[in-house]
Amino acid sequence: METNNLEGINTLRYSDIFLAMYFNDGMSCLHRNHSHVLVYMYSGELEINERETVTRLHKGDCAFIRKDFGVQLTKRAYKGEQFKAIFLMFTTRFLREFYGRLDKNQLPEEVRRSKVSLRKLPSNRPDIVSLFESMTPYFDSGIQPTEELLNLKMAEGVYVLLHTDKSLYASLFDFADPWKIDILEFLEKNYMNDLSLEEIANYTGRSLATFKRDFKKVSELSPQKWIIRRRLEAAHALIRSGVRNVTDICFEVGFKNLSHFSKIYKEKYGSSPANSISY
């Protein structure tokens, strides 16, 4: 068990399996999931902002956040109660082992991965309440749960999701054909983020070698050149709209160096970013 206390944050973590987080005051952090997450609220408020779409979770609420999801999470007290929640972190290793035990003949056919990255589950569902309320004694008392119990609770969490919507089979087991995450769809949502090729491969359910091979099937460009081209296209559209200054646009679309951005922008569009602004 790991216990951390920092700036009003108290976290209790058992192995790599689930994490309880307590916040006495409102806090905000930019969070990018390296694992699928099932979060359950005991108290307080969790505000989830996805590209200006805001979802708020309160006591008894439960939600699934897919691993390729970059959101702004704000944790705060609510109605006099501190923030308190448990996050089940579904690692690829755990899901591969779980998938290996499934009867493949019972898997739903022609299931497509939902485009919704945040999924709020029905409130007060018996299996959800039972799962998370059974965990509270371990966090309140500090008693160390066994690895067998941890794996059992994680498996319960997976079944909660699979019993919610069959499309979640495709989200949870996206490392297995035919449920790999669509590469171009992922990059379209994340081209502005500072991700390595290894991270992109992982987020799309592939090894690095498989990612490079699959990318050649969808683009004549290398992944790096595709990302640069997409950033330039986004920057060009914003510059032509005249609603932001060039510096802000440069960093918003993912470039880190203004002079480098100006140089490659001029090479592609024939004029500097400043000269392309429409008024």
Image: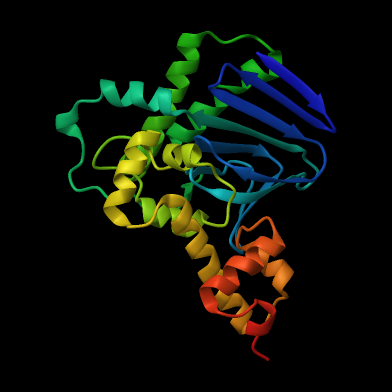
**Residue in view at x 36 percent, y 41 percent:** 211
From the top left corner, tell me how far across and down residue 213 is, in percent: 30, 42
**Quarter assignment of residue 271:** bottom right
Q: Residue furthest left?
A: 105
Q: Nearer the viewer, residue 63 or 236?
A: 236
Residue 81 horizontal side relative to residue 37, left or right: right
Residue 244 visible? The answer is yes
Give the quadrant of the N terminus: top right
Q: Residue furthest bottom?
A: 279
**Residue in view at x 20 percent, y 26 percent:** 103
Residue 166 visible? The answer is no
Q: Nearer the viewer, residue 75 or 178?
A: 178
Q: Residue furthest right?
A: 7
Residue 17 horizontal side relative to residue 211, left or right: right
From the top left corner, tell me how far across and down residue 195 is, in percent: 55, 45
From the top left corner, tell me how far across and down residue 84 is, in percent: 69, 34
In the displayed structure, 217 sits above or below 87; it is below
Give the quadrant of the C terminus: bottom right
In the displayed structure, 9 sits above or below 47; it is above
From the top left corner, tell me how far across and down residue 67 is, in percent: 49, 41
In the displayed structure, 54 sits above or below 16; it is below
